[in-house]
Amino acid sequence: MKFRSRLVVNLDHFAYNINQIRKISPKAQILCMIKADGYGHGMIPMARYAITEMGIREFGCATIGEALKLREELNELEFDIYVFSDIQLELLENADIYLKRRIIPVISNVSELDYILHTPEFRHFPICLKFNTGMNRLGLDPNDTPLIVNKLKQHGRNSVHHLISHYANASSDMNAHEVNVLQRTRFGEIKKFFRDSGITLERTSQSNSGTIEQKVGLPENSDDTHVRPGLMLYGPSSLNSGVPGNFEGKLVSKLETYILRTFEVKKGDVVGYNSTPCPEDGLIAILAIGYGDGFFNRYSGAHLYHKGFEGVIIGRVSMDMTHVFFPKEASDHIRAHEIFTIWGAKDGDLQSFCSETKIIPYEVFCALLPRVPRVYRLN
């Protein structure tokens, strides 16, 4: 059967991006973020390749369900998993999963820490603490640092497995944005208090993709041990326009579909739902992709390219199809049944697509639904 639409994932590009991170920070241990099904690229294949081919041993998920799937699918491999947000530690069955499946919850409030400290089964369990240094999302209050240190010491805990913070504005200049400067200062103060109190910090990290790109919070210029790349693993930069960075990744994925049908139109001819009129004489190519695949109506008006011709998504995207309007000069060149690459055909085409639609690459990647199969390739 001819494929309908597919996301072609280039594992060589994934390896290239990991190696670029290693060049930026040779001393850092890499904790790869693979939540949301590997940012839409397939959590299990990406993690397996990272472990077996790239020597990665630590991964971050958002939910206990993601972590459990990772452990079950890759149970023959050795690696650590962190659950960063939806840890659901208070549920008895989940506590059992953490204990028996070697999954580490990232503790972000005092009640979760109390549960760990007061539950005998967790007495030798690694403690990972996340502090809210200014993002005001999840995280322990820095003002509670003395309380937390006292609780650890009262229970005979003299070390923390991993101490974490997360930036709210890592896409902006790390040295100019006042919140970034504040967060860095606070995290440094928290680490110092722990160490001055006799608590060993086995691992510390603050650098996500944008921070890594700006070479901030690396072992080379801080006392941190780890970096936590997310989006940059898959190619795109997470920096705002004009913010200088040190990473030039390769886009890992290519979204391909094919042309169901082409037909010529005259100016004013209408197409699709709501009868959108064509702006001039031209050619319509109907693509075999729509919002049932995670390719949404919000993309209407974005430009796509095929055989050197510029087209524009016209009218409403439907569940299974998308209309693309091309100039009439394309009529002798664009044909039905041809493979059509939406992004990944050339450098910068995903960035252009995201800029036009005002939708960040995170969303574009994660929106693709399971109806779009992921195909993995080397070389």
Image (cartoon, rainbow, N blue to C red):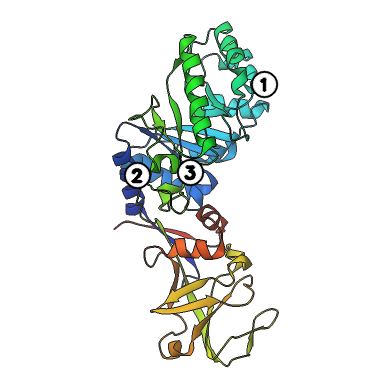
Q: Give the CA distance from mark 2 to mark 3.
A: 13 Å
Does residue 190 appear left or right of residue 347 in this picture?
A: right
Mark sitting earlier along the chain (2/3): 2
Q: Secondary structure at mark 1?
A: helix
Residue at screen point 57% across, 65% down:
295
Q: Secondary structure at mark 2?
A: helix
> Label 3 is placed on what type of residue?
Ile
Residue at screen point 34% across, 42% down:
21
List x then y, in percent, for residue 352: 46, 64
Q: Give the CA distance from mark 2 to mark 1.
A: 36 Å
Q: Nearer the viewer, residue 277 or 178?
A: 178
Local packing at callout 2 (Cα closer than 10 Å; few below 14, some 14-19, many 20+) is many
List x then y, in percent, for residue 214: 39, 41
Q: Nearer the viewer, mark 2 or mark 3?
A: 2
Residue underneath mark 1? 111
List x then y, in percent, for residue 315: 63, 77
Q: Secondary structure at mark 3?
A: loop
Residue underneath mark 2? 18
Q: Nearer the viewer, residue 320 or 71?
A: 320
Which residue is most to the bottom?
A: 266
* Depicted 261 relative to depicted 191: above or below: below
Q: For the C terminus, which image quadrant?
A: bottom left
Q: Give the CA distance from mark 3 to mark 1.
A: 27 Å
> Label 2 is placed on what type of residue?
Ile
Q: Nearer the viewer, residue 351 or 121?
A: 351
List x then y, in percent, for residue 19: 30, 44
Residue 34: assigned label: 3
Could you tell me if residue 297 is visible in this image? yes
> Label 1 is placed on what type of residue?
Ser
Local packing at callout 1 (Cα closer than 10 Å; few below 14, some 14-19, many 20+) is few
Could you tell me if residue 102 is visible in this image? no
Residue at screen point 55% across, 41% down:
66
